[in-house]
Image (cartoon, grey):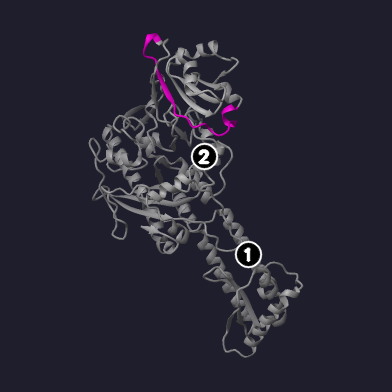
Amino acid sequence: MEVTRKNFYECLDLIQKSIEESDFVAIDGEFTGLDHPDHGQPQPFDTPAERYQKLSKGSVEFLLLQFGLCTFKLNPETQQYETNPFNFYIFPKPFKKESPDQRFLCQSSSIDFLASQGFDFNKVFREGIPYLTPDNEQTLRECLEQKRQLISQHGSSSYFSPLEQKDLEIPADQKVFVDTVCESVQTFVDNSKETVLDLPPCNGFQRKLLYQTLRNKFSNSIHLETKTGERKERFIVVTKISSDEELKKKENEKYSTELTKLDQAVGFSKIIRLISSSGTVVVGHNMLLDIIHILHQFHSPLPQEYEEFKGFLHSQFPNLIDTKLMASTSPFRELVSSSSLGDLLNILQTKPFKTVDYSIPEDFPKYDLENQQLHEAGYDAFITGLCFIGMANYLDKLSSTKYPLFSPLSPLLEPFKNKLFMSRVQDIPYVNVTGNDIQPTRDHIFHVTFPKEWKAADLYQLFMPFGNVQLSWINDTSAYVALHNKDNAGMVLKTLTQAETYRVISYKESKRKKIAISEPQPRKKRPIILDDETNGGNNFTKKFKTLNVDAAPFISRRFSPTIKITDPHSTIHIPLSKLVNQGN
């Protein structure tokens, strides 16, 4: 169901009911951009804390424009999943002058991609649902309350200027304008049968002069209110008042209207609050960035400290599951050739997986899995939920204990709970929201500084005696180099360490000196693996293989720890070496 500013409040009760009755919800987002190079690009050797710093500083200036929400509820009689997919268009339209007037960044590649997918930018900007954070909402409520108290003290808003109580001297160039308006109001009060008069549009300073002049001249016989026209022009509306009671009633109506407008301005934030307060399981695909945007855009600024962020996240969404992590983990890793969302859906429609039986109500869009609508947030949330059910059912199939009904809180899913996939990093595959993060040994990784003129071949030649390596550029004069053969790590520091043209230090020392964090914009290079194939490894006429730039660092499977999926009667061991990056 498409939800915009026009039908948001018509749909709100249905959305709330769907969330509260669901077994779980799936989410997805579309953004104006993904990352900012000034804050560092994600790298294969990031720690969770470093990745959080990069994402929290480099992505929050972009805007979440479209939010997908799909609720899932299992019908125990038919064993069919009732799904309600919602596709929200979101835009931070200020509802009054005191409201936040948000600035945001756009990344040309992201905008181009959305356009290529048929994204309706006009609908976002014209009909996007507004939102306010709790702090913004509280500030505006306090302003309204202060204004209400001031009105009660003076009897009417006409007794004070909207901007200040001290009268201003009318400048010479404004006297004609003010006098003309006063004459028209005098005629309106004395002779007109009409009860309401719209004054001509004018600027803020002119309105201030009119408020104070009309206040002094007509006292309690009129009520003044500023309104905004269709073209954003602002003008004063004059209403005749016959008694103090009528004036008080008018002011109360105005206050009530402003409270209603404020409540409407909270807008889409209501959806996030409903999801949070429900405590339901929230499923996403590669959802770390989505979660960061949701918290920052609709709740409050992100904490600076990583551990504080994890606590904040868990307080808002206590049950998270990332299908990207599931698909990248045994037993799915051996069956899933690509964990990108569209590919994963296709794979889960084939054996040994079982197709998910679902239904969509008539007044919702009829999503067709044969004609995928990828990168529409509502559709992506819908298929994320289907992928989750498909993989959860497969785990149940492998378990010695059979659960009669699917439950997103099943013990089989406990190993994936509150662990968010961390892309491009193999030895730390996820952010552990509710526990300690994995701390792998990285003694085989080295930080190298070198002249700007050096190319990849120079680095591979330098490390040639130690076998195959994984190269990750930091900038034009530094890089991380990881040995495929960890046993050679001790030889590197004994042999290379420092020369006139380069310097090699351990990964641990580089982190102690915070070299990686403080480096400028990364250099865009394609990692290369050097195959040590001929002449006993001493011939430089080697074969170069081009790798994907997003390739994860090599981690020996011999020493990989395991995750245990445990129910009361069965255990599935999952090597962390199976947790690898395969795209989005």
Q: Which mark is residue 42?
A: none
Is 213 covered by the magenta stretch?
no
Query: In the visual, does 180 lie left or right of 279?
Result: right
In the current view of this chain or complex, which residue is farthest to the right? 169
Depth check, mark 1 against mark 2: the one in front is 2
Residue receiving disc 2 = 55
Query: Image point 52% across, 62% down: which residue?
Result: 263
Query: In the visual, does 362 lie left or right of 299?
Result: left
Query: Image point 51% across, 24% down: which residue?
Result: 480
- In three-dimensional space, the C-alpha distance between marks 1 and 2, rounded to whole angstroms, equals 38 Å
Residue 279 at least partly seen: no
| The C terminus: image quadrant | top left
Find residue 527 and report its image quarter.
Answer: top left
Where does the magenta region start and end?
514-536
Q: Which of 259 and 458 is in front in this view?
A: 458
Sequence order check, earlier mark of 1 and 2:
2
The percent coordinates of residue 115 (x first, y second) are: 41, 51
The percent coordinates of residue 207 (x first, y second) are: 66, 72
The crowding category of the residue bearing disc 1, from other C-alpha atoms within 10 Å (few below 14, some 14 to 19, many at least 20), is: some
Q: What residue type is labelled 1?
A: Glu
> On screen, 151 above or below 53?
below
Residue receiving disc 1 = 145
Q: What residue type is labelled 2?
A: Leu
Identify the element where label 1 is drawn. Answer: helix
| The N terminus: image quadrant | bottom left
Q: Which of 227 and 454 is in front in this view?
A: 454
> On screen, 509 above or below 348?
above
Identify the element where label 2 is drawn. Answer: helix
The percent coordinates of residue 334 (x first, y second) are: 30, 29
Find residue 575 and report its image quarter.
Answer: top left
